[in-house]
């Protein structure tokens, strides 16, 4: 059994997605992360509106591969870079409902991510040494993740 400890809940605002269409690798879409917030016991704050985005790839097998980079600003003014890769997939009818902007029960699809963090802040230097995982759900305004530190 893998033991974890909550880092934070992350809520991202994704108002716009640019669809590049079919590329040699699959359907490429780039989502603009326009802000958000994160809150946990050890750190909390906001997501800086720029730079930030998700270079999503919809593979031919129906799996969406996430490639995200965002900048977190803690409530005391420190900056933490957060990058993650992830996967989202599920039954075709569930994924179609998500794509249409519907709220869908997150237990009906797979949505996982593996973030890494980078900061120069002495106060938050501990996060540079953390292995983390997250589970997500997709809401109409953007994804919401529960991010956990692996102990």
Image: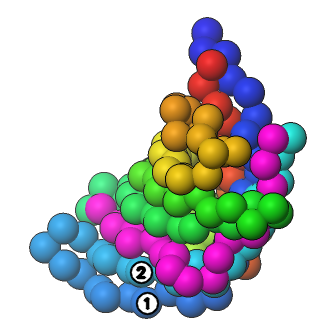
Tell me the residue at 81%/41% (across/down): 42
Residue 87 appears at what percent x and percent y?
A: 45, 51
What whole-number distance in Å separates the C-alpha atoms at marks 2 and 1?
A: 5 Å
Tell me the residue at 63%/19% (across/down): 151
Of residues 129 and 32, the one nearer the viewer is: 129
Q: Earlier in the sequence, mark 2 or mark 1?
A: 1
Q: Looking at the rendering, in which quadrant would you find the N terminus?
A: top right
**In this rendering, does residue 77 appear at all?**
yes
Most distant residue in the left direction? 24
- Which stretch did the figure color magenta? 42-59
Secondary structure at badge 1 equals: strand
Tell me the residue at 24%/70% (across/down): 26
Tell me: 131 left or right of 11. Answer: left
> Which residue position is annotated with label 1?
18
> Which residue position is annotated with label 2?
30
Of residues 59 and 115, the one nearer the viewer is: 115
Number of marks present in the image shown: 2
- Circles 2 and 1, Cβ within 8 Å, touching? The answer is yes
56, above or below 133, in the image: below
Of residues 89 and 86, the one nearer the viewer is: 86
Q: Quadrant of residue 74?
A: bottom right
Residue 22 appears at what percent x and percent y?
A: 24, 81
């Amino acid at each position: 059994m893998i033991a974890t400890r909550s880092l934070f809940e992350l809520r991202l605002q994704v108002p716009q997605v640019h669809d590049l269409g079919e590329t040699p690798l699959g359907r490429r879409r780039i989502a603009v992360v326009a802000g958000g917030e994160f809150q946990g016991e050890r750190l909390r704050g906001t997501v800086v509106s720029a730079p930030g985005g998700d270079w999503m790839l919809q593979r031919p097998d129906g799996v969406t591969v996430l490639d995200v980079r965002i900048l977190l600003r803690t409530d005391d003014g420190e900056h933490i870079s957060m990058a993650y890769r992830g996967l989202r997939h599920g039954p075709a009818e569930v994924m179609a409902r998500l794509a249409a902007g519907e709220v869908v029960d997150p237990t009906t699809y797979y949505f996982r991510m593996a973030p890494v963090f980078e900061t120069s802040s002495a106060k938050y230097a501990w996060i540079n040494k953390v292995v983390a995982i997250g589970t997500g759900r997709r809401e109409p305004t953007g994804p919401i993740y529960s991010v956990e530190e692996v102990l």
